Image (cartoon, rainbow, N blue to C red):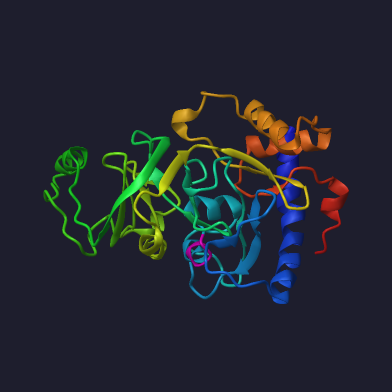
Amino acid sequence: MLVSRFWSSVVRRVWLPGLCAWLVLAAAAGAEAWPPGHHPLPETGDVIGEIQVVRVRGDETLIDVARRHNVGYEEIRMANPDVSIWAPEPGTEVVIPGRYILPDAPREGIVVNLSEMRLYYYSSEEVVETYPISVGRDGFATPVGLTRTTIKVKDPSWNPPRSVREEAAARGEPPPEVVPPGPDNPLGRHAILLGLPSYLIHGTNRPDGVGMRVSRGCIRMFPEDIESLFERVPAGTPVNIIDQPFKAGRTEDGRIFVQSFPQLEENVGSFEPLNNAVEILRRVSGGEDLSPVAYARLRALVDEPDGLAVPLERPVARLLSVPE
C-alpha cells in the first residue's frame, strides 16, 4: 500500500501537472481531425488516442466537459479526483482520459468492456470507434458473452419490466404498462436490439448517467452516439461483451502501456487482480520478467485504478524531468 500511495502521489503531483503543460503545447501544434470517438486502427500495436488537458468553460460541470470529449462519468471522475463534479472553477484544468488500449478480443463488430464501461466498434479495417456507456448495476449485471445485433427501432416504446413496476408501486408511483416515445422514455430515441432476449443498446433521457453502472443490464449511450451507430451498424453485427478490468498492450513503436479499472462488485474475489495483471503483462511482453520499477507501477495501478492508459515502466527521474 505504501508503494501504491507513493506512485499515485508521484503521478498526480508531478507527472500529470507536467503532462498538462506538454499536452497544451501539443494540442496547439494541431493533430489530424477525426470525428468524436473515431481513431485510425493501428497496423501494429494496441494503443489509440491521446490523453488531453482542457479547461472548464464558463459554468460547465465536469459532466459537461466529459460529454464534450466523448468521456463518461466514472472516467472523468477517476482522472480528476480533486476537481468538483458539479461546480468546477472556470478555467480549471481537466485531464481527458482519451488514450485507450484496445480490448484483448477479436477486432470485429462491437466489443463491450464492462469494467471499462466503454464500447468499441470496428467500423472498417482502418477505423475503430469508441464510446462511453452505462452497464448493468449490481444485481442487474450485463451478461458476458457473444451475441449479434438484430432489429433497430427508431423512437421505441418502453414496456417497464415487472421489477420496475413493483419498485414504483412500493413508492406509490406505479408506471404505465407502456411508456410511449418522448422525453420521458428511458430508451431515448434509438434502440438496437441484441440476440440476448431483453437486452438492448439504446439511448437515454438521462445522459448525465452515461459512464455509470445504472441500467438493468442494457447498454446505454449518449443520444448523439447511439444515433450515429444506429444509422451505420447493420443487423447481424457481432457483439462481444467481455469484462477486462486490466488491459495491457503495445504502441506501434513497441512500448508497453497498461490501463486499470475497478472490478465489478459481483466479480470481486473471483480472481486475484495483481496476479491477473502479471499474467496479462507476461503475454504482452512475450514472457519477460518485470523490473522492480514496472512491478511497483503495476501494483499501484491495480491497487488504485484510475482508468488512465500509461506507460508501464517510467523511472522517477524521467517523471521529474517533464517540463512544468
Q: Taking 272 as reference, is 321 left or right?
A: right
Question: From where the camera sits, is residue 92 visible?
Answer: no
Residue 245's place in the image compared with 62, above or below, is above
Q: Quadrant of the C terminus?
A: bottom right
User: How many labels were placed on the picture?
Assistant: 0
Query: Quick one: 324 or 140, which is closer to the camera?
Result: 140
The reply, left or right, for residue 249 in relation to residue 165 is: right
Compared to residue 67, the image places residue 144 above or below, namely: above
Residue at 61% across, 46% down: 306
> In this view of the protein, can residue 172 be seen by the observer?
yes
Q: Position of residue 92 (x, y in %)?
A: 61, 67
* Residue in the picture at 40% in, 62% down: 232
Magenta segment, prevailing SS (helix, strand or loop)? helix
In front: 128, or 161?
Answer: 128
| Horizontal side, residue 118 vs residue 294: left or right | left
The image position of residue 234, as x and y in percent, is: 37, 56
67 in the magenta segment: yes
- Quadrant location of the N terminus in the rendered image: top right
Specify start and end residues of the magenta stretch as a single range.
66-70
Q: Is residue 93 magenta?
A: no
Residue nearest the observer in this picture, 86 or 261: 261
> Residue 184 placed where, x, y %?
22, 60
Q: Is residue 236 left or right of residue 161?
A: right
Seen from the viewer's position, the closer of residues 47 and 267 is 47
Relative to 70, residue 257 above or below = above
Q: Position of residue 142 (x, y in %)?
A: 38, 38
Residue visible at 74% across and 72% down in the picture = 25
